[in-house]
Amino acid sequence: MQIDLEHLHYWMCAIRESEDPKRTLDAFWRGQIDSKLWLIENIKPFINRPNNIDIHGGWVGVLASLIFQSSMPVRKIRSIDIDHRCETVSRMMNKKEEIDGRFEAVTADMCEAKSTAEVVINTSCEHITQKQYDQWLMNRSRESLLILQSNNYEISEHVRIASSLEEFVKQSHVNVLWKGELKLSLYTRYMIIGKIDV
């Protein structure tokens, strides 16, 4: 997938103007980008019309920007993160779509945020406890397509990693439509596409 020059310009502005440019640059490590491109490639077969998409744990908005630049049909993306510093960066990262009314950045606790979006993405499952995850899942619509990612990377901010894809499936309590893993240099990324068990 190619990054167009207009989006690249907004990326550079977002990094330069952020409170912590070094932290913002962490969103562009190879493993981060590869995980997001892998997500986009694998959810395309499940999305055949423009949808509202909520990204929970949206960080600085890179995933939203990559989705907008892909061939995936999108009506609007809402990027939710508990860190208030992410909102301004995320808005700049997706400035073109924000101007068009197709992007919104929100500061909120994803575990408490309600959502009516047709597609809900949570790539931060390792950052919340099982109790928090169960609360998050309870606030999702049974009609929403859920895309979940976690990993086996042991660092202090990861409070609920999975040692395998099957363990991640057990943690997630969803009806699995697709599952897979992506081996990266420092860790393995796990992903599930599914819906809440009825």
Image (cartoon, rainbow, N blue to C red):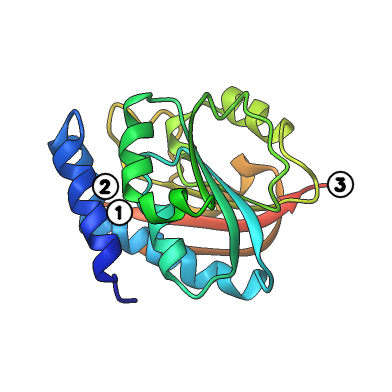
Picture residue at 43% right of the left edge, 32% below the top: 127
Q: CA distance from mark 1 to mark 2?
A: 6 Å
Upstream in sequence: badge 1 or badge 2 = 2
Q: Amino acid at mark 2?
A: Ala
Q: Which mark is residue 27?
A: 2
Residue behind mark 3:
198
Which sits in the foreground, 51 or 120?
51
Q: Which mark is residue 13?
A: none
Q: Residues within 10 Å of mark 2 (few under 14, many from 20)?
A: some
Q: CA distance from mark 3 to mark 1?
A: 32 Å
Which image quadrant: the N terminus? Answer: bottom left
Residue behind mark 1:
32
- Place of residue 104 in the rendered image (x, y in percent of width and height, measured from the top left): 50, 41
Q: Residues within 10 Å of mark 3 (few under 14, many from 20)?
A: few
Secondary structure of the residue carrying tag 2 is: helix
Cβ atoms at labels 1 and 2 below 8 Å apart = yes
Looking at the rendered image, the disc whose residue lies closer to the viewer, 3 or 1, is 1
Q: CA distance from mark 2 to mark 3?
A: 35 Å
Which sits in the foreground, 177 or 19?
19
- Place of residue 187 in the rendered image (x, y in percent of width and height, measured from the top left): 30, 52
